[in-house]
């Protein structure tokens, strides 16, 4: 098998096995990934920073005994830092900033054997569920080049879906792993709060909303990598219970019958398309046929109020981000340094009092307690991953604030809950729309229970496979 065929025809675990067996070398796979990026990135704009020379050097010394044995990989251009590479977070404000060290997560990527080829596109400060920053321009969805791959990990999802790399780094503050996974036909797990450390630069981002992991073609890739990236660092502000068994090893254990709560309508009132509803209902029927108990139910907290409070905390995060980078870079922020929406959010946050911010945090924590009571009754909560298929590019470029908020709700009002509660959650591919675009279902699990989520995802992967469904760019 050629390296080019192996790259596009295997997940990361499969590619690592070929390298470890000596059927291919890490250098050959890295060269194949570079060729794929050079061929497809002009159309997709998924990769915004390349580091091919160093990647080839790393591939030459990659250990075949490591978990991923020289598999090519891309890092999202936000939060995680790669020594010697620019970090822009999609913003003009960061200018020519170059990271002086690897973040802890990147160190763990390297220790797992991954070869970093560069960095992927993201909206400014990962703010939006689409990837259209002014700094680098829009990333396109390989399923339909007129549509967005979602955000904020849209560059990563587009690159993985297109076959540039078998998996890519992503992070999630309101759905930024799961929404792009849903839009691009990939598997996306958001781990529990504190499962993956944000060291050394951060302890807590946005009152615990942010989680780090990857988007992948397969469940086993996500599980194996989490085995190598999970774990606290001294001084981390949170700890997470559970996860004493290996996540990859957990996949081999049988799935016990689960009690699953099902919600088809968005609790905030955001619209859900008939095709999305039908897909989730079909998934529920499949789950029942696999021996699980599914009943319609929803958490009792006021979802509309939670969305408002989440918005307040998210706006504060934007202000914190501007202040953080202003202090770190020694620069004074001005309107011309930022996109219009970012600057508006920054000013809005500056007008709020500290007490108002803490009240929003308080109310989200109260909603978290209500969610915990719901999860005492159910092992998992099943919903749509998003209320619709992938949006057209430019869908969020609107002047009217109420229209923008409504459109944001279409994509994020199922996913944001697991960010403020800190629970693990995942988007699982499930079917295609009438337009031939990916659809996905969403599961929220109990705190620290990624293992059960991963086992269920593997069961669904076997019962309703998605790996053979390829986007236009890969099948052409």
Image: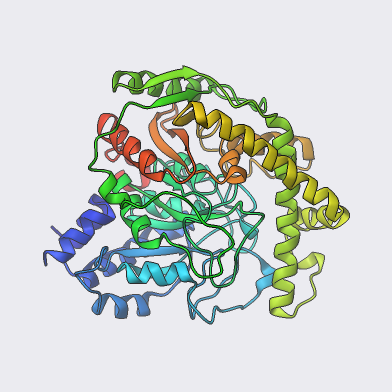
Tell whether 282 sits left or right of 69: right
Q: Is residue 259 above or below residue 157?
A: above
Query: Could you say where residue 68 lies in the image, as x and y percent from the top left?
Result: 27, 63
Rendered image coloring scheme: rainbow
Q: Residue at x 46, y 39 (%)?
A: 182
Q: Residue at x 27, y 52 (%)?
A: 11
Please tell me which residue lies in front, 45 or 125: 125
Image quarter of the N terminus: bottom left
Image vertical order of residue 444 relative to residue 222, above or below: above
Q: How many marks?
A: 0
Q: Is residue 387 visible from the viewing direction of this image?
A: yes
Q: Is residue 40 above or below residue 390?
A: below
Closer-to-camera residue (135/410): 410
x 50%, y 76%: residue: 85
> What percent of the width, then of the height, locates residue 103?
50, 72
Q: Quarter of the image holding residue 97?
A: bottom right
Specify whether 223 is left or right of 118. left
User: Picture coordinates of residue 295 (x, y %)?
Assistant: 46, 17
Question: Horizontal and vertical percent for residue 57?
Answer: 30, 81
Which quarter shows the C terminus?
Answer: top left
Residue 476 in view of the camera: no
For residue 24, what is the image quadrant? bottom left
């Amino acid at each position: 098998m050629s390296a080019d065929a192996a790259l596009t025809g295997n997940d990361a675990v499969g590619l690592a096995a070929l390298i470890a067996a000596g059927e291919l070398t890490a250098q050959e796979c890295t060269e194949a990934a570079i060729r794929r990026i050079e061929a497809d990135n002009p159309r997709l704009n998924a990769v915004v920073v390349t580091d091919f020379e160093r990647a080839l050097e790393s591939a030459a010394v990659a250990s075949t005994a490591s978990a991923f044995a020289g598999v090519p990989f891309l890092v999202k251009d936000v939060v995680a830092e790669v020594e010697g590479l620019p970090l822009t977070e999609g913003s003009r404000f960061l200018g020519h900033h170059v990271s002086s060290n690897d973040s802890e997560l990147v160190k763990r990527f390297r220790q797992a054997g991954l070869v970093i080829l560069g960095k992927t596109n993201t909206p400014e400060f990962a703010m939006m569920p689409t990837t259209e920053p002014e700094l680098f321009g829009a990333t396109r969805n390989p399923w339909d080049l007129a549509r967005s791959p979602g955000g904020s990990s849209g560059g990563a999802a587009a690159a993985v879906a297109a076959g540039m790399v078998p998996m890519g780094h992503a992070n999630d503050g309101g759905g930024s792993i799961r929404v792009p996974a849903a839009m691009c036909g990939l598997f996306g797990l958001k781990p529990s709060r504190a499962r993956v450390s944000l060291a050394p630069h951060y302890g807590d981002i946005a009152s615990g909303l942010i989680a780090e992991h990857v988007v992948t073609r397969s469940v086993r890739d996500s599980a194996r990598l989490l085995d190598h990236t999970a774990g606290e660092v001294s001084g981390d502000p949170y700890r997470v219970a559970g996860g004493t068994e290996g996540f990859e090893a957990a996949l081999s254990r049988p799935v016990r019958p689960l009690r699953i709560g099902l919600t088809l309508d968005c609790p905030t009132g955001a619209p859900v398309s008939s095709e999305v509803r039908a897909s989730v209902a079909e998934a529920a029927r499949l789950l029942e046929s696999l021996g699980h108990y599914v009943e319609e139910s929803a958490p009792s907290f006021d979802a509309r109020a939670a969305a408002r409070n989440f918005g307040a905390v998210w706006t504060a995060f934007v202000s914190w981000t501007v202040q953080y980078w202003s202090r770190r870079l020694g620069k004074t922020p001005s309107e011309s340094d930022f996109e219009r929406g970012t600057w508006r959010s920054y000013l809005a946050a500056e007008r709020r009092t500290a007490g108002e911010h803490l009240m929003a945090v308080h109310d989200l924590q109260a909603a978290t307690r209500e969610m915990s009571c719901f999860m005492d009754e159910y092992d998992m909560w099943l919903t749509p991953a998003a209320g619709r298929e992938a949006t057209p590019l430019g869908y969020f470029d609107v002047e009217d604030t109420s229209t923008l908020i409504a459109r944001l709700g279409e994509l994020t009002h199922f996913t944001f809950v697991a960010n403020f509660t800190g629970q693990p959650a995942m988007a699982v591919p499930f079917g295609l729309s009438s337009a031939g675009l990916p659809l996905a279902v969403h599961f929220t699990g109990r705190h620290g229970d990624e293992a059960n989520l991963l086992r269920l995802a593997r069961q669904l992967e076997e019962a309703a496979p998605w790996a053979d469904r390829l986007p236009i760019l890969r099948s052409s």
